[in-house]
Amino acid sequence: MKIKNSTFVISAVAKSQYPENHLPEFAFAGRSNVGKSSLINMLLGRRGLAKTSSTPGKTQLVNFYDMDGLFRFVDLPGYGFAKVSKVKKEGWGKIIDTYLNEREDLIEVFQLVDIRHKPSGEDKNMYEWIRNCGFNGIVLATKSDKLSKNQVAQQIAMIRKELKMEKDAVILPVSSTSRDGKYEVWDVINALFEA
Ligand code: GTP
Ligand code: MG
């Protein structure tokens, strides 16, 4: 799939702000700084569509991006950002919960984890949460450019085990820097789109 026009739609806090026209949505979840916004840009070959930052906590709302009027990408706020207050953290849970549970247009959730590290408790909770909401949860192991090929394979096996992924569950290494995994992710999206 080649997207000609990708545009930012809205940053939403409340459900009432979600786009009203029905289009399939693919969401990206994961710890703050894991590379969600960068990945959206990489998939589209766009630099600054989704705002990225080396300071964690850049994306705090649910950001909707329209893809040629055919479907949407949804950049979810990251978790595990120590500096946000408890009140804000609770707000975060509610925002994600509302989106995952009440969004009828949501087709699938991509969960991003850093390929270099063992999934955190929060990563495990998020994966379970996605699964409990009835989604497959496609795991994308980010920043694969930081590791050698051998290390990538090892870390993928480790993450699979740590997240207790089922045999046929999908995990892919990706890199926004080297564009590793770009076509594999698009293959997954295409398959979901056709299903
Ligand atoms: P929040 O919006 O805070 O939740 O973060 P995010 O998950 O959207 O992360 P973002 O895309 O803003 O990236 C965070 C940092 O990681 C930035 O400094 C990026 O340049 C860097 N980064 C993202 N993806 C990659 C990657 O594939 N490889 C490398 N080496 N760095 C990356
Ligand atoms: Mg972001």
Image (cartoon, helix red, strand yellow):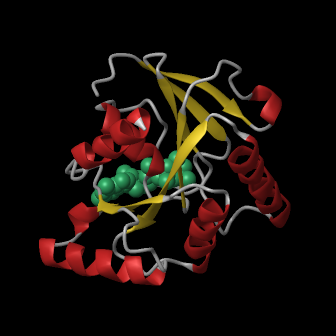
Q: Residue at x 34, y 70 (%)?
A: 115
In this view, which residue lies farthest toward the right?
Answer: 87
Where 94 sits versus 131, above or below? above
Rendered position, 169 above or below 188: below
- Give above or below for 69 relative to 115: above
- Residue 161 position, x and y percent, is 41, 83
Task: Name the residue located 66 percent from the left edge and 18 percent from the top edge.
Answer: 21
Front-most of residues 128 and 94: 128
Please indicate, yes or no, whether residue 142 appears anywhere in the rendered image.
no
Residue 18, image x and y in percent?
72, 29
Within the image, what quadrant is residue 186 found in? top left
Quadrant where the C terminus sits is top left
- The residue shown at (28%, 43%) is 187
Task: Choose between 177 and 156: the one closer to the eye.
Answer: 156
Q: Position of residue 84 (x, y in %)?
A: 73, 61
Kindly identify the residue that appears in the image at 28 percent across and 54 percent down: 175
